[in-house]
Image (cartoon, rainbow, N blue to C red):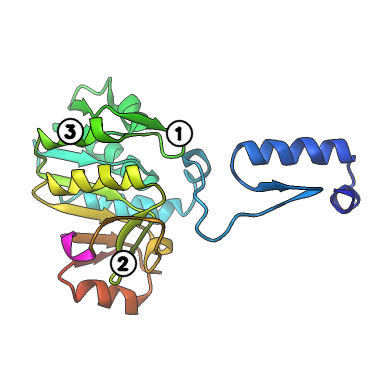
Amino acid sequence: MTQLSRLLGVSQATVRRDLQHLSEQRLLERTHGGAVVGGLSIELPLQHRADQRSPQKQAIAQAAADLVPDGAVVGLTGGTTTTEVARLLADRGPVTIVTNAVNIAAALVLRPAVTLIVIGGTARSESYELIGPIAEKTLADHHTDIAFLGVDGISAAHGCTTHDQLEAATDRAFAFHSGRSVVVADHSKIGRTTFAKICPAADVDTLITDGQAPEAELSAIASVGVRITVV
């Protein structure tokens, strides 16, 4: 605490207050006398991910939207890239969107070209998603033409993964009850593995990513039957 105070030229009370604020937002972990940054697999809350790699995410989202025919029924899990897909589809319309992401639902609820179906469940504040058995049961009673999945990692060895096991099960239901499952993920997710498995890579029809994704891992993912689109 003293070192931070001297380095930043502020009082220890200010350092203590700012560290507490960052801790509450899950951007670091408080320790006795200071704080530490989380590990490489830390999940940032959605509001802190919205602007990361936005040009790549927008290009990925455009390629994803181009796969959707007019009048299709589209499943969308939560995530910054899937949110971009939702906006593009709403601008184009007409489309039916099935989502468990409350931020996507809020953005689309007044859009006249969108028929919106919101999947219920337990709210997860980190991703703005409704997850759990209620969501899975609802998805089991519906079918989408194409589902876009946001993931925290995808690799040939470990498949699609996310940080939360209930979220993983809900994402799995989106994929299982869709005619086609498409993962939208920027290069930081390629070759990465996080805690909870959504599905094997072979269960994914298409992966859309950007040009900075590692070629060796993309080749490995393609070798299990996944179509790769690089934007």
**Would you call the spot at circle 3 few (<14 residues within 10 Å), some (14-19), or many (20 or more)?**
some
- Please name the residue shown 61% across and 46% down the image: 27
Dots 3, 2 in contact, CB < 8 A: no
Give the CA separation, mark 3 to mark 1: 21 Å
Residue type for callout 2:
His
Q: Label 1, secondary structure: give it.
A: loop
Answer above or below: position of 25 versus 156.
Answer: above
For the point 18% across and 72% down, which residue is it? 224
Q: Nearer the viewer, mark 3 or mark 1?
A: 3
Segment tinted magenta in the rendering: 201-205
How far apart are labels 1 and 2 at the CA level?
Answer: 26 Å
Q: In the structure shown, which secondary structural element does the residue marked by tag 3 occupy?
A: helix
From where the camera sits, is residue 3 visible? yes
Q: Would you say residue 203 sits in the magenta stretch?
A: yes
Q: Main secondary structure of the magenta part?
A: helix
Q: Determine whether the residue tagged by mark 2 lies in a helix, strand or loop.
A: loop
The image shows a total of numbered marks equal to: 3
In the picture, measured across the screen, residue 48 lies left or right of residue 203, that is right
The mark nearer the N terminus, 3 or 1, is 1
Could you classify mark 2 by the number of other residues whose Cα lies within 10 Å: few (under 14), some (14-19), or many (20 or more)? some
Name the mark on residue 158.
Answer: 2
Whichever of callouts 3 and 2 sits on the residue coming sooner in the sequence is 3
Residue for badge 3: 137
Q: Is residue 231 left or right of residue 203?
A: right
